[in-house]
Amino acid sequence: MDKILVRGGARLTGEVEIGGAKNAALPIMAATLLAPGVFELTNVPSLVDVNTMGHVLRVLGAQVTHHDHSLTIDTTNCSYHEAPYELVKTMRASVCVLGPVLARHGKARVSLPGGCAWGPRPVDFHIRAMKALGADVEIEHGYIVASADRLTGSVIHFDTSSVGATENAMMAATLAEGTTTIENAAREPEITALADFLNAMGARVAGAGTATITIEGVDDLHAVEFRVVPDRIEAGTFMVASAITGGDVLLKGVVREHCSAVISKLQESGAEIVDEPGGLRVRGPVWGQSVNVTTAPYPGFATDMQAQMMALMAVADGTSVITETIYVDRFSHVPELRRLGADISVDHNVAVVTGVKKLSGAKVMATDLRASAALILAGLVAEGETEVSRVYHIDRGYEAIEEKLAGLGADVERVRE
């Protein structure tokens, strides 16, 4: 098992390339199951979750080749309809094969998912969406079992905005008979990217990026080439890395409007963020100011940036209040940040962070993907060495983060425990 060692004190400078978005790549990979043919995806990050989804597709009959940052997916002979527990348990996003497999084959058997250790994230919305489209759906021995001769367009209303359920409903509805309207749809950039991919395949999806998405069903779709959008969470993480170290970093390939909420809070804290050809330059303050943060569905402040922002607030001037409204128990990183000297108190879904002048390196344990990033960020400004264990979490969402940080001047390395 690997661990990452961070020796704090370096000011980050230079350029970093932001990779493709994991949370866009995964549903796009699943959407290739809707049609036979050879798909070419580019700007795909080399991540554990992408490899896991590739294994899921292979089990379903696809041929998947990953070279550099490109994926070739041949779905010509996809005839199997079961996504097994052994794979789905390791990554919740695997459940998004439910919609495309059901729509193409008229039946699907997908294991109930696993994933991060914190917080229940039920698949009820996915199941309700399939039922709304006319499928018979049952839970049998830990599997979602769905069937339909052909799905039928319908109105799908989500009580709470759900990215995964919106994606599953969109994909299933592309081959349904008639028109489907998704109300209170998720608005994230990854939803828009999936809609662009589906439309390139011949689907008729309108309204992506708004709360109402309309899909006119078609009889068939075809294979295409497609480039995955940049990862806004990786971009936000490196923005915080520059800010927390008082650095001067050019982030290349980032889409500014995808990161508006994070940019706004960083500017409020004292960072300077400037548009440059090909990217954004982030200059951190000598000592940032505390800001209050409340997570919210896009275009609000992303829950996936909450832990990183908390690391920044741990060394800011003043006291900040961080309110988590998406996954109310997503504070497993707090005890580990305290081990580094952070002053944080938690009451239910609210964390109060009083900035300290310095953090001190210590041994800490990563508890989930974004917590891993937060601990590394804190280590960048902690005195001495911070040892972050269980970093297999971070490999699910960041490609070679230690190499990218080292390229900016950080004293960081990955070693075997």
Image: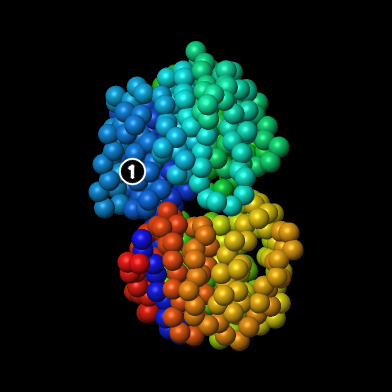
Please state which of residues 68 and 360 is positioned toward the viewer in this rendering.
Answer: 360
* Residue 380 position (above or below residue 323): below
Please state which of residues 413 and 105 is positioned toward the viewer in this rendering.
Answer: 413
Quadrant containing the C terminus is bottom left
Residue with the most extreme top position: 149
Residue at x-position 42% and y-position 31%: 83
Residue 57 falls in image quadrant: top left
Residue at x-position 51% and y-position 18%: 147
Residue at x-position 51% and y-position 57%: 368
Please state which of residues 115 and 322 is positioned toward the viewer in this rendering.
Answer: 115
What count of labels does the image hold? 1
Q: Position of residue 262 (x, y in %)?
A: 58, 64
Q: Which type of secondary structure does the marked residue at label 1 adopt?
A: strand
Q: Is residue 250 left or right of residue 368?
A: left
Residue 179 falls in image quadrant: top right
Q: Position of residue 265 (x, y in %)?
A: 63, 69
* Residue 161 position (above or below residue 243): above
Residue at x-position 45% and y-position 57%: 393
Residue with the most extreme right position: 347
Question: In this orientation, does residue 230 appear?
Answer: no
Residue 314 falls in image quadrant: bottom right
Quadrant containing the N terminus is bottom left
Looking at the image, what colour scheme do you see? rainbow
Please state which of residues 246 and 227 is positioned toward the viewer in this rendering.
Answer: 246
Q: Is residue 30 left or right of residue 69?
A: right
* Residue 4 position (above or below residue 62): below
Residue designated by label 1: 41
Q: Position of residue 269 (x, y in %)?
A: 63, 76
Question: In this orientation, does residue 344 appear?
Answer: yes
Amino acid type, callout 1 = Leu
